[in-house]
Image (tube, rainbow, N blue to C red):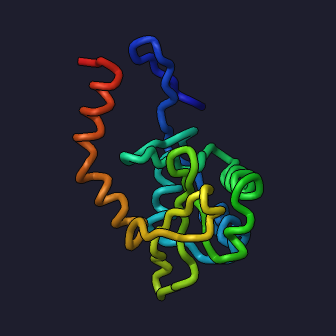
Amino acid sequence: HRKVSKFEGIRIWNAIESIVSDEDIRDLESYLGHRLPNSYKFFLKHRHFIELQLGGYYIRFFKNLPGTLLNDVKAEIENYYDELIIRRFLPFARMGDHGVLCFNANNVNSDHNYEIVSLDCDDLYLNPQSYSIDFESMFIEFDTHLDDWIKTSRINRNVT
């Protein structure tokens, strides 16, 4: 059920409505060993996507395809970030070509709205840097820059 459109000679995969269930979320939380923020659960239940890029540093959320959420996240983490789970950092997106965004589960609050931190492979993911106070705030920040990113993207592609 993928929907593909053509945009100036480029094939684009359009996000489709998500079928992620509460059970899928519980399985993911069980794997991670932590509950997830409600805002992130909503995000996963909103749309499926192969690659969702946002932000000036090209935040690429781990793919969310129908029926494969847990397996896709496990593969991403086990291939690149398994040591982070042990340190209570829960990866959910790549940052540029050298970093990762994680929920910092070292400081749990009652709503499980973890701080978002970035970690860089250049320092072996040892020095977490604060990125946003939580997942929802990160998207609010994205929204304030969206028009600029679209304009920049069009300029870079020479699209009018």
Which residue is situated farthest in the bottom direction here? 110
- Where, by quadrant of the figure, is residue 9 drawn? top left
Residue at left offset 50%, top offset 79%: 112
Horizontal relation, residue 68 to residue 12: left or right? right
Quarter of the figure with the N terminus: top right
Residue 94, x across and y down, in percent: 55, 51
Residue placed most toward the observer, 156 or 5:
156
Q: How many marks?
A: 0
Quadrant in the picture for residue 105: bottom right
The residue located at (29%, 18%) in the rendering is 159
Residue 147 image offset from top left, x and y in percent = 23, 41
Going 40% across and 18% down the picture, which residue do you hit? 7
Determine whether 60 is above or below 160 in the image: below
Q: Position of residue 60 (x, y in %)?
A: 51, 46
Closer to us: 160 or 4: 160
Horizontal side of 148 relative to 77 (left or right) equals left
